[in-house]
């Protein structure tokens, strides 16, 4: 397994949380009992009353490869979030649903994103 390099975004309501990931590699990370093997953007577990405009994630020119989630989103997991993915390679990730990206109640924008199945 790779070094722990997971990103979790979370915020109280009425606050905007924004994270930018650029020119990065997330390889061999794991969330065996959860969602988002490499990156997770979700509501705060305590406040759970924000809206998707408050949780923003941008991932650009990055490699999200060979990550694993016991739940959903082997590479990236989004819950009540807005994400923009640009010029990324998401390959060889594993999860119950959404091997590369899983988005629930979220807005997903993207361009030049290469997605591969778990077998590649």
Image: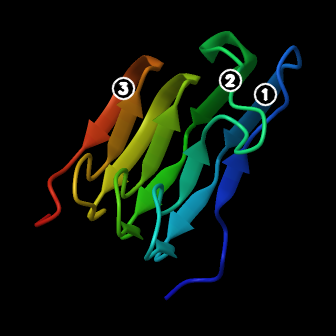
Question: As displayed, is residue 86 above or below residue 25?
Answer: above
The residue tagged 2 is 56
Q: Is 97 left, or right, of 2 in this rendering? A: left
Counting from the top left corner in percent of width and height, residue 101 is at 35, 41
Counting from the top left corner in percent of width and height, residue 62 is at 54, 47
The residue tagged 3 is 112
Toward the viewer: 56 or 51? 51
Q: Residues within 10 Å of mark 1 (few under 14, many from 20)?
A: some
Q: How many marks?
A: 3
Residue 13 image-quadrant placement: top right
Whichever of callouts 1 and 3 sits on the residue coming sooner in the sequence is 1
Q: Residue furthest bottom?
A: 1
Residue for point 36% across, 58% down = 74
Question: As displayed, is residue 61 above or below residue 95?
Answer: above
Counting from the top left corner in percent of width and height, residue 73 is at 37, 50
Whichever of callouts 1 and 2 sits on the residue coming sooner in the sequence is 1
Residue 19 image-quadrant placement: top right
Q: Whole-Å distance between the Cαs marked 1 and 2?
A: 5 Å
Residue for point 36% across, 49% down = 90
Colour scheme in use: rainbow
Residue for point 61% across, 39% down = 41
**Local SS, label 3:** strand
Toward the viewer: 43 or 86? 43
The residue tagged 1 is 18
**Local SS, label 1:** strand
Q: Whole-Å distance between the Cαs marked 2 and 3?
A: 19 Å
């Amino acid at each position: 397994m790779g070094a722990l390099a997971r990103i979790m975004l979370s915020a109280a309501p009425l606050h905007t949380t924004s994270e930018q990931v650029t020119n990065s590699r997330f390889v061999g990370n794991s969330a065996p009992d959860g969602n988002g093997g490499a990156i997770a953007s979700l509501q705060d577990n305590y406040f759970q009353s924000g809206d998707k405009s408050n949780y923003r994630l941008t991932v650009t020119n990055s490699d999200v490869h060979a990550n694993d989630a016991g739940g959903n989103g082997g590479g990236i997991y989004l819950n009540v979030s807005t994400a923009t993915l640009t010029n990324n390679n998401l390959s060889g990730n594993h999860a119950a649903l959404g091997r590369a990206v899983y988005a629930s109640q979220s807005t997903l924008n993207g361009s030049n994103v290469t997605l591969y199945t778990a077998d590649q």
